[in-house]
């Protein structure tokens, strides 16, 4: 695969590989590319304009919405709506899903998108990398009818595409349509994404573990035992602890270098913190497409049948052998 192909070229060339190829998904990825550039522009100058800090509102999860959360949410919804390629959008920052009626009101669009517009909100004000996460499904209700909640509450296995944007030292868009994972880096001088990381794959194992150890005392025994295992002086251990506090950034590093990210349940958060539909499902789809593994400690994330738009799940994701090891400890001591 010739490196430094543009994202636009890549989308066109790979459209043929997609079973339902009608060009709609390509248009959708292109719209996400555009919205990512707009948000990137705002994120990069965050310190200079009045876009730092809390917006004063809270989202349905009771979290303070940062101004950048609100801005990114608006930009993605606007861009997707204006391009008339989705029939519905769900977002971390919206209480309910948004049904998008195409101008002809005939509801002909077949895709729904679920987004975490700004991931890693706690890092916005301190200039640490943040991201955007997206997940795309084909609707299950008949075309021509308004979209319903059923179209969003699909198991992650049904995703037709998923990806993330990372606003870091460089800005990258990483995504899959079920044919491997590819990463594109933005050349800010000309505003074009280029293929910089073709066919990304997790190493089978690694030496990095990412977990917020500040919550250690509240973790299930299985997680405590796995952390102890990572810290033992034995074989290729101790592993290195790395935790940025932005899921996208911790995931991206671990996919490149080999590692595991864990956000478990705890006696403070019954189902953990991360949201199944627009954080864990898309990252799990990318992980599995990149030779990695993602579970809730017991079962594959992609096999979970969602019941609520903003439901949370424990999340174990990374190099296959490391996730299997952690699952082994969870099996022995689940609580
Ligand atoms: O501060 P904690 O509890 O470790 O949580 C950090 C995790 O929460 C998140 O910030 C949640 O995502 P949002 O910022 O989109 O709400 C993840 O990106 C990150 O991995
Ligand atoms: Mg998030
Ligand atoms: Mg978010």
Image: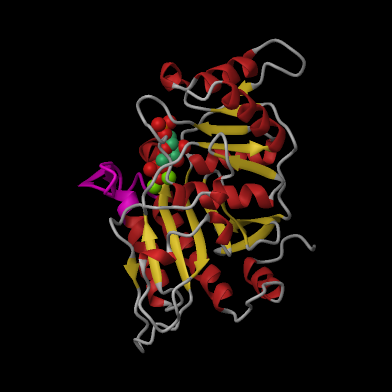
- When the figure is inspected, residue 293 is found, relative to residue 86, above or below; the finding is above
- Percent from the top left, x then y, of residue 185? 62, 55
| Residue at the image point whose x is 39% and y is 35% from the top | 126
- Percent from the top left, x then y, of residue 106? 38, 87
Q: Is residue 245 left or right of residue 175?
A: left
- Percent from the top left, x then y, of residue 269? 37, 31
| Region rendered in magenta | 45-70
State ligand 2's quadrant.
top left
**Considering the image in quadrants, where does the N terminus appear?**
bottom right
Image-quadrant location for residue 219? top left
| Residue at the image point whose x is 71% and y is 72% from the top | 17
129, 201: nearer the viewer = 201
- When the figure is inspected, residue 31 is found, relative to residue 127, above or below; the finding is below
- Percent from the top left, x then y, of residue 234? 73, 12
- Residue 48 is inside the magenta segment: yes
Residue sitting at the far right: 1
Q: How many marks?
A: 0
The reply to whether residue 189 is in sight is no
- Residue 2 is inside the magenta segment: no
Image-quadrant location for residue 47? top left
Q: Is residue 208 left or right of residue 309?
A: right
227, 302: nearer the viewer = 302
| Residue at the image point whose x is 52% and y is 51% from the top | 281
Residue sitting at the far top: 233
- When the figure is inspected, residue 263 is found, relative to residue 235, above or below; the finding is below
Residue sitting at the far bottom: 104
| Residue at the image point whose x is 71% and y is 42% from the top | 202
Image-quadrant location for residue 15? bottom right
The reply to whether residue 315 is in sight is yes
Coloring basis for residues: secondary structure
């Amino acid at each position: 695969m010739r490196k430094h192909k543009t994202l636009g070229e890549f989308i066109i060339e790979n459209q043929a590989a997609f079973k339902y190829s009608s060009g709609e998904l390509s248009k959708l990825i292109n719209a996400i590319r555009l919205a990512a550039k707009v948000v990137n522009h705002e994120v990069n100058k965050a310190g200079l304009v009045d876009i730092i800090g809390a917006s004063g509102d809270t989202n349905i999860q009771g979290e303070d919405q940062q101004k950048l959360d609100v801005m990114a949410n608006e930009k993605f919804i606007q861009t997707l709506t204006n391009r008339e390629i989705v029939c519905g959008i769900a977002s971390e920052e919206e209480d309910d899903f948004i049904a998008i009626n195409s101008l002809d009101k005939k509801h002909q669009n077949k895709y729904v998108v679920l987004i975490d517009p700004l991931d890693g909100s706690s890092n916005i004000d301190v200039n640490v990398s943040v991201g955007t996460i997206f997940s795309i499904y084909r609707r299950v209700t008949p075309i021509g009818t308004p979209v319903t909640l059923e179209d969003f509450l699909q198991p992650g296995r049904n995703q037709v595409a998923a990806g993330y944007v990372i606003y870091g030292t460089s800005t990258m868009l990483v995504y899959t349509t079920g044919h491997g994972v590819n990463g594109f880096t933005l050349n800010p001088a000309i505003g074009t994404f280029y293929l910089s990381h073709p066919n990304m794959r997790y190493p089978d194992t690694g030496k990095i573990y990412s977990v917020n150890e500040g919550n250690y005392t509240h973790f299930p025994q299985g997680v405590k035992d796995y952390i102890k295992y990572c810290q033992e002086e034995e074989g290729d251990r101790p592993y290195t602890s790395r935790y940025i506090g932005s899921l996208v950034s911790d995931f991206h590093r671990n996919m490149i270098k080999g590692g595991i990210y864990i956000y478990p349940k705890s006696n403070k958060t019954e189902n953990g913190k991360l949201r199944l539909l627009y954080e864990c499902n898309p990252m799990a789809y990318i992980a599995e497409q990149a030779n990695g593994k993602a579970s809730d400690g017991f079962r594959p994330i992609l096999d979970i049948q969602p019941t609520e738009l903003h439901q949370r799940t424990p999340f174990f994701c990374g190099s296959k052998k490391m996730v299997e090891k952690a699952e082994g400890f969870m099996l022995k001591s689940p609580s």
